[in-house]
Image (cartoon, grey):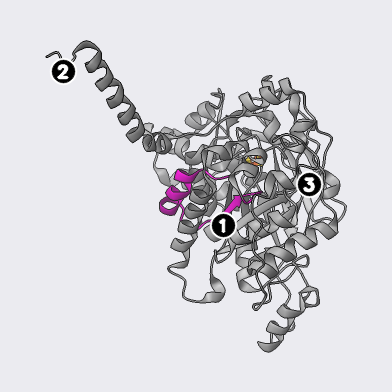
């Protein structure tokens, strides 16, 4: 699915490439661009004309091409417990996205599981309290092409990519509310689907002269675009990686994450293994090991059975991962997904943790009262109607999937959060994983191979949904088909030769 081209009347001042391009074209020293950003972000400058020593010829360039900020916060919603603030942000062309500030911290040692308390007592850390921190969940696209069936944003389809300056403006707005120490790309959009923009954004985030956020506190969450994960090893090796997995096998995953069809699950996990192995190669202390955060939205009667838990445990065993189990958060949508019971979630987590020695936690769910599910606020407050598409009529549900990007490192430090269900006991027996669990275990609710949610749709709607599902195929995937294409071409060529020239007669 191709993103729309947006006509931006003014460029964001935070867009590094655009500013440098115009400054260089007008022979304005780059140092003035850096001073502009520094004063804007770190000293509260609100108007470029107030910047001391700005060359006179820079003003007309800025006035003609740029806007100090190209977006505005049109709605701010705070959760009752103060943990979450959701911002609905509108850009100059009326497109809207959302960002979420998540506050964590001051977790008393008494809240830790006994095993962790014992470990800390043994090392005289009994008075430890974790640092208060605020993480911003940012959006990278308007809408999303991935179409995950539990996600409200997935129902919008992809409208357009955000340019780097626009993503950075989300951070600029959030910092007006409070200091932000971490970033997660877990808002609207698939960050690896607008790769170059996200890499340029990370540059601005980590730049000490601008937002000065440590790259290890920036996490990119992806449904899994394999060539891009490998490219990240070169372009952003220090960032955290989160994988939206949601299922332990290709069949079930393809139903929850339709674009997963393009990326076999074993190849995907091999890519994330490679990414984190590269990070850990340079780390000597075992306590500081990095992990891939594996996100698992758990949905009743879809991916919550014991058999699926065993399959998931077997898949993740002996990998540097931290499994984050997120109970599905229902909204009024055609997909008939429901949240699992607390007991079911606990049983599921126990199997993966105790049986397979996988770091597993059920994260604190923040902001339930303010609909912090991805895309929900935008859909409720649409200013610009997304183009009508075949899948507009089958809006999916959504879940609160934004989590603190520190999770993977938090676990390796032993700084577990309140809702952490503890680490596995080392000597636990490992039950054999059940085979063929996915559809059979769900056959109670659907007699076909469709998901329970799809079973509630008419065949026409289900067919439309299937046809509208984009399949992400990039150049690397096409390249893998080249040998097959060559072979097919050779067979056709030989058959043509035999058709027009019979060697037996010759
Ligand atoms: S969960 Fe993420 S990748 Fe999936 S549709 Fe929603 S925004 Fe896109």
Chain part drawn in magenta: 223-248
* Residue 133 point in image, percent of width and height: 69, 62
User: Residue at label 3?
Assistant: 301
Dot 1 falls on a residue whose secondary structure is loop
Dot 2 falls on a residue whose secondary structure is loop
Q: Reply yes or no: does residue 105 show up in magenta.
A: no
Q: Nearer the viewer, mark 3 or mark 2?
A: 2
Residue visible at 81% across and 33% down?
333
* Residue 268 point in image, percent of width and height: 51, 49
Sequence order check, earlier mark of 1 and 3: 1
Instruction: Calculate the distance from the C-alpha at mark 1 to the C-alpha at mark 3.
Output: 41 Å
Residue visible at 62% across and 38% down?
189
User: Residue at label 2?
Assistant: 503
User: Are there few (<14), some (14-19), or many (20+) residues within 10 Å of tag 1?
Assistant: some
User: Are there few (<14), some (14-19), or many (20+) residues within 10 Å of tag 2?
Assistant: few
* Residue 75 point in image, percent of width and height: 78, 37
Sequence order check, earlier mark of 2 and 1: 1
Residue visible at 48% across and 44% down?
200
* Quarter occupied by the N terminus: top right
Sequence order check, earlier mark of 3 and 2: 3
Q: Quadrant of residue 411?
A: bottom right
In front here: 429 or 185? Answer: 429
Q: Nearer the viewer, mark 1 or mark 3?
A: 3
Labels in figure, total: 3
User: Are there few (<14), some (14-19), or many (20+) residues within 10 Å of tag 3?
Assistant: many
Q: Is residue 360 visible?
A: yes
Residue 302 versus residue 324 in the image, above or below: above
Q: Quadrant of residue 450?
A: top right
Residue 108 versus residue 294 in the image, above or below: below
Label 2 near label 3: C-beta < 8 Å? no
* 187 relative to 204 in the view: left or right: right
User: Residue at label 1?
Assistant: 213
């Amino acid at each position: 699915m191709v993103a729309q081209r947006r006509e931006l009347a003014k460029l964001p001042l935070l867009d590094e490439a655009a500013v440098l391009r115009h400054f260089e074209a007008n022979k304005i020293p780059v140092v003035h661009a850096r001073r502009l950003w520094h004063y804007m972000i770190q000293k509260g400058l609100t108007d470029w004309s107030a910047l001391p020593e700005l060359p006179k010829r820079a003003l007309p360039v800025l006035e003609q091409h740029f806007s100090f900020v190209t977006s505005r916060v049109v709605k701010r919603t705070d959760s009752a417990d103060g943990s979450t603030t959701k911002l609905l942000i509108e850009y100059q062309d009326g497109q809207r996205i959302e960002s979420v500030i998540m506050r964590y911290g001051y977790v008393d040692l008494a809240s830790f599981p006994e095993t962790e308390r014992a470990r800390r007592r043994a090392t005289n850390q009994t008075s430890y309290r974790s640092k208060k921190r605020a993480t911003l969940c940012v959006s990278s696209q308007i809408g999303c092409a991935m179409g995950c069936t539990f996600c409200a944003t997935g129902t919008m389809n992809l409208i357009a990519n955000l340019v780097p300056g626009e993503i950075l403006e989300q951070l600029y707005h959030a910092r007006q509310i409070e200091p932000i120490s971490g970033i997660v790309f877990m808002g609207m959009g698939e960050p690896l689907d607008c790769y170059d923009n996200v890499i340029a954004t990370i540059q601005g985030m980590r730049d000490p002269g601008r937002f000065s956020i440590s790259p290890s506190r920036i996490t990119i969450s992806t449904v899994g675009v394999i060539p891009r994960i490998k490219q990240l090893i070169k372009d952003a090796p220090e960032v955290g990686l989160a994988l939206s997995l949601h299922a332990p096998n290709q069949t079930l995953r393809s139903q929850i994450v339709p674009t997963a069809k393009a990326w076999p699950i074993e190849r995907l996990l091999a890519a994330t293994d490679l990414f984190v192995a590269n990070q850990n190669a340079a780390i000597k202390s075992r306590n500081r090991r990095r992990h891939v955060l594996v996100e698992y939205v758990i949905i009743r009667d879809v991916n919550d059975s014991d058999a699926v838990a065993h399959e998931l445990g077997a898949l993740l065993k002996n990998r540097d991962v931290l499994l984050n189990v997120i109970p599905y958060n229902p909204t009024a949508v055609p997909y008939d997904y429901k949240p699992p019971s607390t007991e079911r979630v606990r049983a599921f987590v126990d199997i993966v943790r105790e049986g397979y020695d996988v770091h597993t936690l059920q994260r604190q769910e923040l902001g339930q009262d303010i609909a912090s599910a991805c895309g929900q606020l935008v859909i409720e407050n649409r200013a610009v109607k997304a183009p009508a598409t075949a899948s507009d009529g089958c809006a999916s549900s959504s879940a609160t999937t934004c989590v603190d990007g520190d999770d993977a490192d938090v676990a390796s430090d032993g700084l577990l959060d309140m809702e952490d269900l503890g680490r596995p006991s080392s000597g636990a027996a490992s039950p054999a994983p059940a085979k063929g669990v996915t559809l059979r275990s769900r056959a109670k609710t659907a007699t076909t191979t469709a998901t329970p949610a799809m079973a509630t749709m008419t065949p026409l709607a289900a067919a439309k949904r299937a046809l509208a599902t984009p399949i992400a195929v990039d150049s690397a995937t096409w390249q893998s088909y080249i040998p097959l294409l060559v072979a097919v071409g050779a067979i056709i060529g030989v058959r043509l030769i035999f058709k027009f020239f019979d060697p037996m007669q010759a």
